Amino acid sequence: MNRMTKIILIVTMTAALVFGFLHLFMPGVNFERLHIFLFNLCSGGSFILIYSEGKKSFSPKTASFYILSVLYALFAFFQMYLYAIVIAVILALLVETIRSARFSFFPRDFFSGTAPIGAKFHQASLLCLSLGLVISSLVIGNHEYWRIFLSPKLTLDIFFLGFSFPVSLITMSVMFGMMEGAGGRWTRVFKEYSFWAVNLGVITFFLFIILELARAELAIALALFVTVVIVFVLYMKLGAPRQSKAFLTSGAVFLIMTAVTGIAYIILYAAIPHPPGGKLLLKLHALVSLYGWNLNGLAVIGRYDDFPIKLNSGRIILMHWIIVVALAPLGFYFRALSIVAVAAYAVFLYLVFFTEKISKT
């Protein structure tokens, strides 16, 4: 990506974390929608589309997506829902034009036994992004206007968490792309299983959340945990030995931690309606998912053609872990640490996205 594109996206990702802490400085105002949308939809969605077009900067389509996604986030925050619904539909159409140009309108590769698994995850990422936008408009319309299906879980505040799924899938795409052609017949079977288990598992998990079926949620969460471990083992064994593998390996460990904290929260909440430490555990779960696993994926696709870069992978990964599992969770409760977390996060983003690549001579 060129310099200006990276600056715009880094500023957006930094602003997302700032809004996550802003409740400490402006009590009584819920900035969670801006916190999530700016990272997952505005930044994550733009990264995915730029990567899908194979370009170094915003095109007219991806620039339109970025601008409209920011407007969507603002309208959702200010509860201007009619505008948000219209924009969501336009965004979905933009995503579909890019997906259809890169792949095909009907995702027939999903059902092919020979199509690359990385490409399947890539197309699934785009399809989930467009479907998520359409469904979000239906969720808003149902909750605010039609009120056909009433559920305390079927709200925008719950549904917006689903926008992290396309980012997760694009990271899976890169990981499986680095394993392409490696392994034998049984390896292919495990790869196919991973693709369907991840996609169908997460969709089923969201349905169980909406229906408030705690035991079913736990069963699916355990199944997803097994799948994540399988993906990790496959990647460690078959992933091409590149510098980017260190970042994606760290991301995969974050993903395992996401699964573990999610399972722990389900069990804890089932045992105690309002468990002590439950909010901190849930916040850690969200941070590890967004700013751990997903951020590693965005960093790799953002610099996909630049690796290797002049960066000490071990040190920058250690810095990343300190931010995600220590500074950021505590920053949600202490003003001073929130400032430190944002500063460290901004430095981390600068180092990852602007460190020079190693010239090949």
Image (spheres, helix red, strand yellow):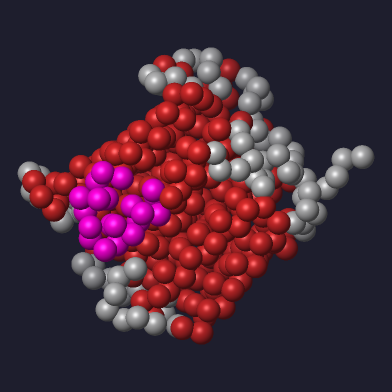
Question: Does residue 325 appear left or right of residue 20 in this picture?
Answer: right
Asked whether residue 290 appears in the rendered view, the answer is yes
Relative to 57, residue 315 above or below: below
Q: Nearer the viewer, residue 304 or 315?
A: 304
Q: Residue at x 38, y 19 (%)?
A: 106
Say which residue appears at 27% left-offset and 50% top-offset. Answer: 84
x, y percent for residue 228: 49, 42
Q: Does residue 98 sit above or below 320 in this rendering?
A: above
Residue 69 in magenta? yes
Q: Quadrant of the C terminus?
A: top right
For the record, the magenta segment spans 68-87
Q: Nearer the viewer, residue 55 or 35?
A: 55
Does residue 120 show up magenta in the picture?
no
Residue in the image at 36% along x and 40% along y: 91
Q: Quadrant of residue 128?
A: top left
Residue 67, position as x, y percentages in the image = 43, 50
Above or below, 353 relative to 216: below
Screen quadrant of the N terminus: top right
